[in-house]
Every structure is written in C-alpha cells, then in structure tokens.
Amino acid sequence: MKSKLTFWGSMLFLLSLSILLTIYLAWIFYPLEIKWLSLTSRVYLKPETIQYNFHILMNYLTNPFSQTLEMPDFRSSAAGLHHFEVVKNLFHLVQFLTLLTLPIFYYFVKKIVKKGFLSVFRKSILLLVFLPLLIGLVGVLIGFEQFFTLFHQILFVGDDTWLFDPAKDPVILILPETFFLHAFLLFFGLYESFFGCLYWRSRKG
C-alpha cells in the first residue's frame, strides 16, 4: 500500500513538473513567439512593449506575492481579471503540488527505482505514457480549436470568462490560439519524455 501511494505521488510530481516547466519555458520563449506569430502586426506595439506586458501578466500569474494585475498597454475587463485570477490560483496549485510531492519522488527514486523495483509498476507507467497519446489523437481528429474549447469547458466548468472579447481585453491579441498550441506541444514533449524514460527504466530493470 505504501509503495503504491509512493508511486502515484511520484507520478503526480512528474505531471505537476511537466506543467510547471511548460509555464516557465513558455515565458522564456515568448520573445520568439512575438516574431513567429507576428504579434506586432496584431496590436501595433513594439516587441519590447509586448514582452513587457506579457512579463507583467506572467509575474502576476506565477508570483503569489503579486496580487494586482495592471498591464500598462492593455486594459482589462472585470471578466478578464476574474479569469486571470482563476488561472493564477491554478498555477499556484501546480506549484504547491510540485513542492509537496518532491520528497515523495525523491523517496521513490531512492527506494524503488535505484533498488530495481520499478518493473512492478511497468503496466501503470505504460498506461500513463499512452493516455496523453490518445487524448492527442482526439485533438487531431476534432481539430485544435475544438479541442481548445473543450479543454476550457472542462477546466473552467460553469465559467465562460475565458471567452475573451478583444475589444474589452485586448491582451488576448498577444495570446493567440497558436501560442497555446505551442504550449500544449511543449507540455506533451516534456510529459512523454519524463514518463517515457521511466518506462524505459522499468524495462531495463
């Protein structure tokens, strides 16, 4: 029972870590997105100005000590601010879960992986590897736009404030759907790398 709790706690750590790394890497690579997605032509601002406002937004979303969102070049509606507040809480939840499960993962590596007992969980790891592949296949079949909508409807059930109106929340113009597609692909790559390596290690052991 203890080993199973350790295993699933460790899997939660890898999932949380994948999400957390996606958030921070998307922040780091955003200057490239400005160029790739031609965001300057969408809002008619300099790249440095777009980057500055995005930095303020991401600092608000990831920093628990930042309690007010004020982007100098983008006004925000009450609905938009509410949505960002909800996202902020989700980001903090991921940060909390990553820190909470880190000691469990350390114990997992020390007591299970290094001692060659990982093969006991091989089928569970394989399931965790294939599950996102199936979800990704669904996304390909229905199209990313529909998948993106479905994702938000599930994650923000009963709350439609994620449906930004560019006239009221122009910041959405520098956060196009393609940007989120890149974030999803980045998460997918990180997740599959972590769990794929774990499955390979389980077969090796």
Image (spheres, rainbow, N blue to C red):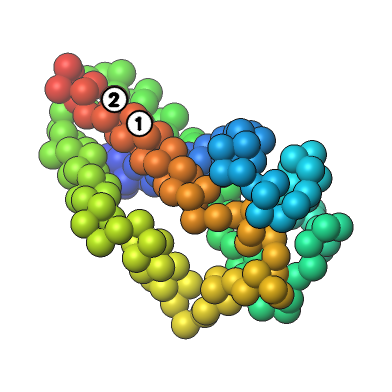
User: How busy is the neighbourhood of tag 1: few (under 14 within 10 Å), some, or many (20 plus)?
Assistant: some
Q: Quadrant of the C terminus?
A: top left
Disc assigned to residue 125: none
Check disc 2 and report its element: helix, strand or loop: helix
- 70 to 2, vertically: above or below: below
At x 61%, y 43%, the residue is: 38
Q: Nearer the viewer, residue 121 or 159?
A: 159
- The residue at which mark 1 appears reads as 194
Q: Nearer the viewer, residue 153 or 62?
A: 153
At x 44%, y 38%, the residue is: 186
Point out residue 67 in the picture as x, y percentages from the top left corner. Answer: 79, 62
Point out residue 187 in the picture as x, y percentages from the top left corner. Answer: 42, 41
The outermost residue toward the right is: 72
Disc assigned to residue 197: 2
Q: CA distance from mark 1 to mark 2?
A: 5 Å
Point out residue 61 in the picture as x, y percentages from the top left corner. Answer: 68, 55
| Amino acid type at image mark 1 | Phe
User: How busy is the neighbourhood of tag 2: few (under 14 within 10 Å), some, or many (20 plus)?
Assistant: few
Check disc 1 and report its element: helix, strand or loop: helix
Q: In terms of image quadrants, where is residue 115?
A: top left
| Amino acid type at image mark 2 | Cys
In the image, taking residue 172 as reference, residue 153 lies left or right, namely: left
Look at the numbered discs 1 and 2 and tell me whether their residues touch, using CB distance below 8 Å.
Answer: yes
At x 31%, y 35%, the residue is: 192
In the image, taking residue 194 as reference, residue 159 lies left or right, namely: right
Point out residue 147 in the picture as x, y percentages from the top left corner. Answer: 34, 62
Residue 203 shows in the view: yes
Q: In terms of image quadrants, where is residue 90?
A: bottom right
